[in-house]
Amino acid sequence: MKRRLALTVVFFAAVAVLWAQPPPVRGALPVLVQTALGRFEVVSIDANAAHAAAGQAEEAWHHLSGPLGLPSAFPSAILVRLVPAADWGETAPFRVIVESGGVVSVRVRWSEATPEIFLRRALVQALLMRLGVAQQGVNEKLTAPLWLEQACVGWWRTHADLAQLDALVQQSAGLTPPDIASILTWQRSDVEPQALAIGSVWLLTWLQSESGRGGEWPALRARLLRGDEPIGALAACFSGRFSREDERELWWQTGWYYLQRQRILPQLGAAESRALLSDAARFVFELGGRDTVLPLRFALRRWSEPGVAVELTAHAAEVERAVAALHPFYRNAGISLLAALRSRAENDAAGEAFEQDWREATALEKTTNEALDALVRRR
């Protein structure tokens, strides 16, 4: 996955604006890490934490662009503040703020022990609110429904890590599907039933699969974000699917069981495998005020620099999750790329090994496609 992450930028005049309280350590200044323009900006006094959070933010954007219909960028980026745990005075682990001018920010309680799920939910909730602002403007009815927040986090997890999709199917197998009204009207509280969280992921998947050229899901998504009553909005957007409550429930439960039969651990195609490894083997950094695409060897030679090690680790985690599902043409290239990303070596041997496997893989794919095309032409 392509990550457009800027190198660390130290703020001077803007510190007072971007950071509401003084740094806990004398002399410690916050840093800003940006993803692609108009997406996320992460502020923290811990540079490594800022880079890691920015990587998560860009991963969220990548995987949720489809179900949320995200634009290429928003007019203003979402500002993510990682607040040291010692300075956090709220009960909730994060808080999303929508300002009158349409700027959306999220403050997250941060420490090395902060569970990943807190950051993911904070990013998703902020993304939903920013999408609502972009579509509806700022108003008091804007909302990020709990079920949609949970569904997007689950969608992100199962699409970033294919093994998690298999785990979701196994968790769902022993459950009675929660009724659709319970999911759509799920309210925030101290208790979040696992069945509703699982059901939310399947419901998001089902609504997308049932949405046709009429744009039923995009229309429903917009209504939900602007605070419409969810059951009525569902009936209005998916008209013709059902006319009574029992028909609606049958429609949903049919989807629940159908999707679980379809959702097996897949193998990626050759083109998908090639695209995944190509993105994982390149890095985008800001050099001289411009985003520059740099090859794997550049990053390997600079693994000890701030932010670069974080990026190498993030790319390695992405490849590790997908390597078992890579097409056979690209399996060796995936293994050697993973070894290179983890090597922390100051020579080019690991990079050379990957490049050799990459050349062989692309040549094999090209030769196979040419042979198949020739066979089709003869027939």
Image (tube, grey):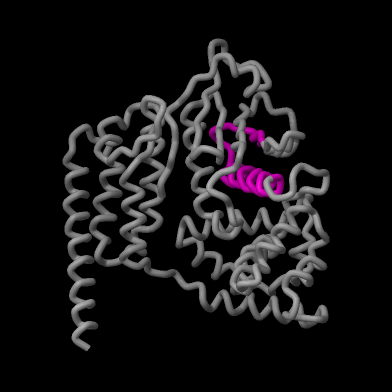
**Residue visible at 53% across and 43% down?**
57
Q: Position of residue 56 (x, y in %)?
A: 51, 43
**Residue visible at 61% across and 68% down?**
208
> Furthest-bottom residue in view?
379
Q: Which residues are magenta?
A: 105-133
Does the segment drawn in magenta span residue 121? Answer: yes
Q: Position of residue 299 (x, y in %)?
A: 30, 35
**Residue visible at 60% across and 18% down?**
15
Total marks in image: 0
> Quarter of the image holding residue 202?
bottom right
Q: Please name whichever residue, 351 or 142, is drawn nearer the observer in this view of the structure.
A: 142
Helix, strand or loop: magenta stretch:
helix
> Furthest-top residue in view?
26
Does the segment drawn in magenta span residue 204? Answer: no
**Residue visible at 59% across and 56% down?**
69
Q: Position of residue 8 (x, y in %)?
A: 45, 26
> Quarter of the image holding residue 5?
top left
Give left or right: position of 151 versus 370: right
> Quarter of the image holding residue 90?
top right
Asked if residue 24 is positioned above or below residue 360 in the image, the reply reads above
Q: Position of residue 10 (x, y in %)?
A: 49, 20
Asked if residue 86 is positioned above or below residue 58 in the image, the reply reads above
**Quadrant position of the C terminus in the picture:** bottom left
Give left or right: position of 359 versus 240: left
